[in-house]
Image: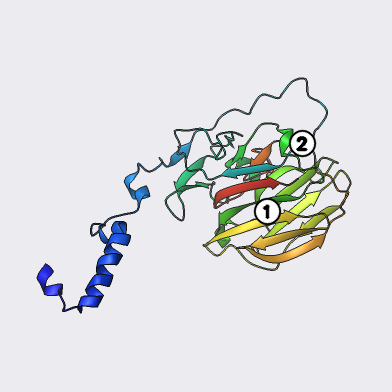
Amino acid sequence: MLHSRRRAVPIGATLVLGLLFLLTPHTAGTPAGAQPAYHLMTPPSAGVLVNAGRFATPTGRSRVQTASAPVALRYDFDGGVDKPIEDTSGKHELRPLGQNGGTLRLVPSDGPGLAVAYPDRCTLPKERDCPRAILEGQRDDSLNPGRRPLRYGASVLMTHGDLADGANVVQKGYSVGGVSQFKLQVDHRQGHPSCVIAGNRARIYRAEPQIDVADGRWHDLECNRSSEKLTLLIDGTPCASVPVPSALSIANAEPLRIGGKGPGLGNDQFAGEIDNVFLDIGA
């Protein structure tokens, strides 16, 4: 009962407590058991993302352009399955693409939001029979950094059962054929993340630490390209870097892809969960 918690308090202390009550009415007046505001909101709907067709190829645009202004792109996937997958500004739509029955799911993340769950690592004898699924945007040359400073990355949740020789997290372009590329991946069966960039020449630049992130916990992975080097950060800590020529330019006609380099055979399919994808192109 309330009176059982009363204690004798000196008059001076009573005045101080009264002032604190007036200055902090929200704290003092909060009912017992009250929850943060987000608990009172209708949670976004989890579930299967229905596979869609690719975006139509833009017409009348053959020459590849680069970003003409800084870019800040964020995907938190918290809109639920009933809304298009768009960045937090409501633009840059991504579509789920799948083959062989591969689908993506929105599942509860580490907090009140959602994350994208990818197909389980395939164990079928023939890779061509494996389910595959990715998120893919449309051609958008404003996401080509050229020589500008570049930050990109995502949060990932993986176990050793999710690992394979290739598991692409975020990418735009390809590292071979003179296409150019920026990419984040968790390749090999040691669970080592790596950042990769390539220009229109044969050389590929990779920053990869000897650190295993496939431990069943969420990790924030960031790739940071400055004028002189490419750095990989894990949970905010720089863990590996490699020198990069300041003249290297990344520009291609490929869309932004999350979870693989396409839905087809040999796509370096990601397995596990991805959240909080971001892309920052500097001035």
- The mark found on residue 68 in the picture is 2
Tag 2 or tag 1, which sits nearer the N-term?
2
Residue 101 in the image: state x and y as whole percent: 53, 37
Check disc 1: other Cα within 10 Å, few if <14, some if 14-19, many if 20+: many
Q: Quadrant of the N terminus?
A: bottom left
- Quarter of the image for residue 209 reads bottom right
Residue 140 higher or lower than 165, as above or below: above
Position of residue 241 in the picture relative to residue 116 (left or right): right
For label 2, the SS is loop
Q: Please say whether residue 4 is visible from this viewpoint.
A: yes
Position of residue 250 in the picture relative to residue 124 (left or right): right
Of 222 and 121, the residue lying toward us: 222
Q: Amino acid at mark 2?
A: Ser
Position of residue 80 in the picture relative to residue 7 (left or right): right
Q: Amino acid at mark 1?
A: Gln
- Quarter of the image for residue 146 reads top right
- The mark found on residue 185 in the picture is 1
